Image (cartoon, rainbow, N blue to C red):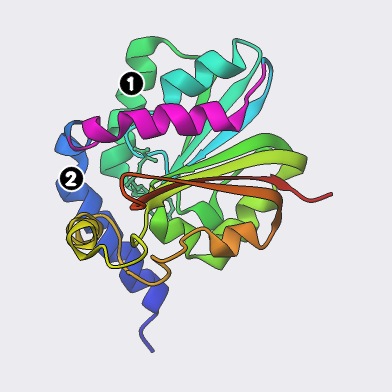
Amino acid sequence: MPDPLAARRAQALEQYRRRADIYDFELTAFEPIRERAVERLALEEGHTVLDIGCGTGLSFNRLREAVGGRGQVVGVEQSPDMLAIARSRVHDGGWRNVRLECQPVHLSRLPARADAAFFHFTHDILREPGAIDHVLAHLRPGATVVATGLKWAGGWSWPVNWLVLGAALHSVTSLEGLRQPWDRLADALDDVEVETFWFDAIFVVRGRVRG
Ligand SMILES: C[S@@+](CC[C@H](N)C(=O)[O-])C[C@H]1O[C@@H](n2cnc3c(N)ncnc32)[C@H](O)[C@@H]1O
């Protein structure tokens, strides 16, 4: 019996194997969203933050500056090609407070009670209940969770949605849930706030772990 999750994982690994070398360039236009999203994490000195689906580590510098030398950034990424770039970034920066895990999220080794989790442009992960549950189980009550990404723009925004479709087709393995990609995550959070940008095609969602 074919395993649909394994097939999607293989597709995602191939997608990011092909994109790894040009990924940072492709993301340049989205950097203001990353800045806004990291700000929404409201990190403090000494915090441990999980960067879920960390890719090439484009968020690491901002995250590690926010948590300081006593804090820790844990990057989880299943693509060895993307993670190799993240690893060089950490090595070149001499960053001792960044730990990397090359695993699918649901199998990753995470700290017991992290203070925050960051899902930046990780649609596939947000649609995988096992991955969300695994991350939430490793956050303390009250921890901040921020998720961002592409979404279908509301209303009759078909020109915008053509662009969303084009971007999604080479970034995700399923368009399922693209209207509200955060809905499964938000079900488990309190104080959920949703902001949208770029003609409603990009979201930044923040919430807090219950308890
Ligand atoms: C669009 S990239 C975002 C990378 C990074 N968060 C950033 O801000 O640039 C999505 C990343 O999620 C990773 N990914 C997708 N599904 C995953 C899973 N189940 N476990 C771990 N990583 C996953 C992909 O390999 C890819 O590097």
Which residue does the image show at 66% across and 38% down from the upper left?
Answer: 144
Mark 2 sits on what residue? Answer: 19
Q: Residue at x 42, y 26 (%)?
A: 35
* Spot occupied by residue 199 in the image (x, y as percentages of width and height): 31, 49
| Residue 26 appears in the rendering | yes
Q: Amino acid at mark 2?
A: Arg
The answer to whether residue 151 is left or right of residue 47 is left
Residue 47: in magenta span: no
Residue type highlighted by circle 1: Arg
Q: Is residue 191 left or right of residue 156?
A: right
**Mostly what secondary structure, the magenta segment?**
helix
> Total of numbered circles in the picture?
2
Position of the N terminus, as image quadrant, is: bottom left
- The part of the chain drawn in magenta is 26-44
Element under disc 2: helix
> Does dot 1 land on a helix, a strand or a loop?
helix
- Residue position marked by numbered label 1 in the rendering: 89
Of residues 207 and 73, the one nearer the viewer is 207
Q: Nearer the viewer, residue 111 or 29?
A: 29
Report if the CB atoms under discs 1 and 2 are less than 8 Å apart.
no
Task: Tell me: 195 left or right of 71.
Answer: left
Asked if residue 72 lies left or right of residue 195, the reply is: right
